[in-house]
Image (tube, rainbow, N blue to C red):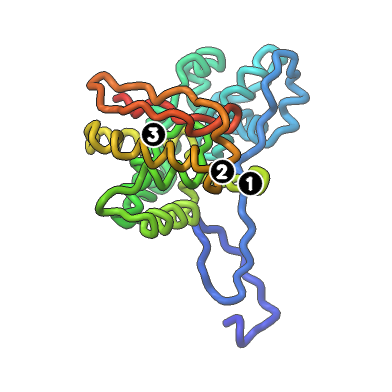
Amino acid sequence: MLESAPGVRILATSRQALRVAGECIVSLSSLESPEPSAALSAKAALAFPAVELFVQHASARAGEFLLSDVEAPIVAEICRRLDGNPLAIELAASSAALFGVRELAARLDARLALSMKGRRTAPSRQRTLHATLDWSYDTLSESERVVLRRLSVFKGQFSLGSAVAVVRDASLGPSHALNALSELSAKSLLVTAASGDSVRYRLLETTRAYACRKAGRRRRGAGFWASATPSIMANCSNGRRPARKVCSTQSRMLAQTSNSIVADIVRVDKGRHGVPGGLCHE
């Protein structure tokens, strides 16, 4: 069609690039939220699209919702904890009528966000975040599923070298791991961000919680973590890119799970870049 009518332009939204000739990709980031501030006013908060969307959907569910200066920092916190995800914010705003803003913020965690229900008229895969992620997960190859589950060990940002060291094993070599990471990024399940001359990666908190649940059914023993630890430490101590700039101080250890399956992993990611958190707890 485009060859026959070169003046035609098609605007399409998709979870991943179509990978067709002539395609120009514009990535849409999460909705922006205010920075933490106890002095945030309602007027200032409403200038941010995440808060504006929350108020819009809260009003649709419970009549007119007037954001007060007292509630503005709380709603901003909710939006930040939901990573600016439009569907998550819509679902949370619908729950505000039940809990109230303050109680919603107190109860909100990734697991609650996954289970909150939306409109019955929405497509089945958009009625809860869990359903949306189920739909995305089902489209992944088995190696991509494995890598996503294993990446849930990281809380916050992590380097490419650390990711490969954690996800690889005898059946998943470095090249396959890199390919899976690339596909997860292309499918909007892995967030990338430039950091100086390197790229950092992270899972949205709701995505990480979902991957944790999946990993919980396939939890690996201490043997894997013991074998992964030298690779991660070598990636740091040998100064290999891209980890060479983020390994200058010792990070806190991976918290051990109740059944003691996690080996200590140190010197992975520095300070503000985020560090690996504990393995998933169910």
Question: Marks 3 and 2: CB-CB under 8 Å?
Answer: no
179 vs 238, left or right, is: left
Disc number placed over residue 200 in the picture, else none: 2
The mark that comes first in sequence, 3 or 2, is 3
Question: Which mark sits nearer the N-terminus, 1 or 3?
Answer: 3
Residue 27 in the image: x percent, y percent? 61, 54
Identify the amino acid type marked 2. Answer: Arg
Q: CA distance from mark 1 to mark 3?
A: 21 Å
Q: CA distance from mark 1 to mark 2?
A: 6 Å
**Residue depicted at 43% across the width and 44% down the height:** 163
Determine whether the residue tagged by mark 2 lies in a helix, strand or loop. Answer: strand
Residue 96 in sight here: yes
Element carrying mark 3: loop
Q: Indicate the quadrant containing the C terminus: top left, top right, bottom left or bottom right.
A: top left
- In the rendered image, which residue does mark 3 sit on? 153
Residue 253 in picture, x, y percent from top left: 42, 24
User: Which residue of the protein is positioned furthest toward the front in this rendering?
Assistant: 238
Tell me what residue is drawn at x 66 percent, y 48 percent: 197
> Can see residue 90?
no
Which residue was labeled with disc 1?
Answer: 194
Q: Reading the chain from its start, which is encountered first: label 1 or label 2?
A: 1
Give the percent coordinates (x, y) of residue 186: 49, 56
Residue 212 located left or right of residue 154: left
The reply to whether callout 1 and callout 2 are in contact (CB within 8 Å) is yes
- Find residue 133 and report its horizontal and vertical position in percent: 39, 44
Q: In which quadrant of the rendered image does the N terminus lie?
A: bottom right
Cα separation between marks 3 and 2: 15 Å
Q: Is residue 41 above or below residue 277?
A: above
